[in-house]
Image (cartoon, helix red, strand yellow):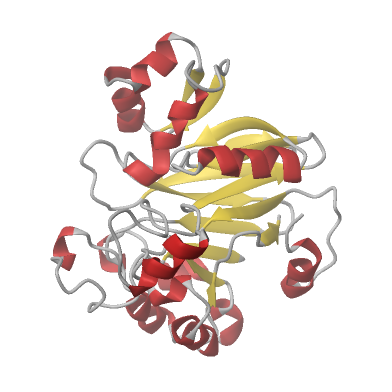
Amino acid sequence: MKYFFSFILFIGFPFSQDSPYVVVLGIAQDGGSPHAGCEKRCCKELWTNGDKEKVSCIGIVDPRSGKSWMIDATPDFPEQYRILTKEHDSELAGIFLTHAHMGHYTGLLHLGREVMGAKDVPVFAMPEMKKFLESNGPWNQLVQLNNIEIQPMKNDKEIKLANGLIIEPFLVPHRDEYSETVGYKIMGLKQSVLFIPDIDKWEKWDQEIFEVIQHIDIALLDGTFYSQDELPNRDMGEIPHPFIVESMEALYNLNSSNRNKVHFIHFNHSNPAIRNGAASNLIRSNRFDVAREGMIFPL
């Protein structure tokens, strides 16, 4: 497994290889990196050398049962599915969706008859997300042909994945043009992981992020944009996210052990933190961290 042993040492407690864990399968915003149409410095070299960052996605693996679950079906689904099932030696037992923006559900198309021809893959969705998939093509064809079987979810309602392994969706404010948006709390016997890849400003949420961090063990938080000046030709009010600098300011009064829980994820291609450099070093110097593909968080 990529980075397995080095990252377990970082976590800091004994870990059985039979224990469930979360693995990071991608860290980029919906369009990935390099980004379509971008010839600026942030993408130009990537087009030349063929490197890329996959779209934000995490997997949950239970070695005891040999099963795994994916949160979000991204445009990079083929590679992420292969990593989860082959490198982590598991069978995909379901996909949990966060919302209906392109980087979070369009990978479902690979389950259709043009590609995998899958059979009854459980897809967990909130009510509006479920309605969207059932009412619009080509997604409704996946339902009609039994490629996927939609499993309804409810806000704040726990779902048992296996013994000692639970996932819970919760609503967050975001641009909900086609569906509601959720984050997830994944709970094992030893640790809990919070996953919020997309949210509007923290103050719009009905929970206080400062308090939430103190009651979980790992937080993978929306790091789409680093600062206000990142996209000078765009109205940032149309694509609201908490800037990383805002999140660090909001959470700075946490002690170091609590700040260490926070790993930013879902980076726009323009975000300097997507690369190892000054921005990611500054984040770490403030005792926060940056998610990287292959990181593993024991549960």
Residues 277 and 50: in front is 50
Residues 126 and 34: in front is 34
Residues 158 and 22: in front is 22
| Percent position of residue 45, x then y | 44, 69
| Percent position of residue 280, x then y | 49, 80
Quadrant (top left, top right, bottom left, bottom right) of the N terminus: bottom right
Residue drawn 73% across and 64% down?
3
Number of dots carrying numbers = 0
Residue drawn 41% across and 43% down?
104
State which quadrant residue 37 falls in.
bottom left
| Percent position of residue 161, x then y | 65, 35
The answer to whether residue 124 is visible is: yes
The answer to whether residue 158 is visible is: no
State which quadrant residue 5 falls in.
bottom right
Q: Is residue 168 left or right of residue 67?
A: left
Residue drawn 85% across and 47% down?
18
State which quadrant residue 248 falls in.
bottom left
Quadrant (top left, top right, bottom left, bottom right) of the C terminus: bottom right
User: Does 130 sit above or below residue 103?
Assistant: above
Residue drawn 46% across and 63% down?
48
User: Does 273 sit above or below residue 28?
Assistant: below
Residues 119 and 156: in front is 119
| Percent position of residue 7, x then y | 73, 68
Q: Is residue 55 left or right of residue 136?
A: right
Q: Is residue 69 left or right of residue 48?
A: right
Q: Is residue 223 left or right of residue 298?
A: left
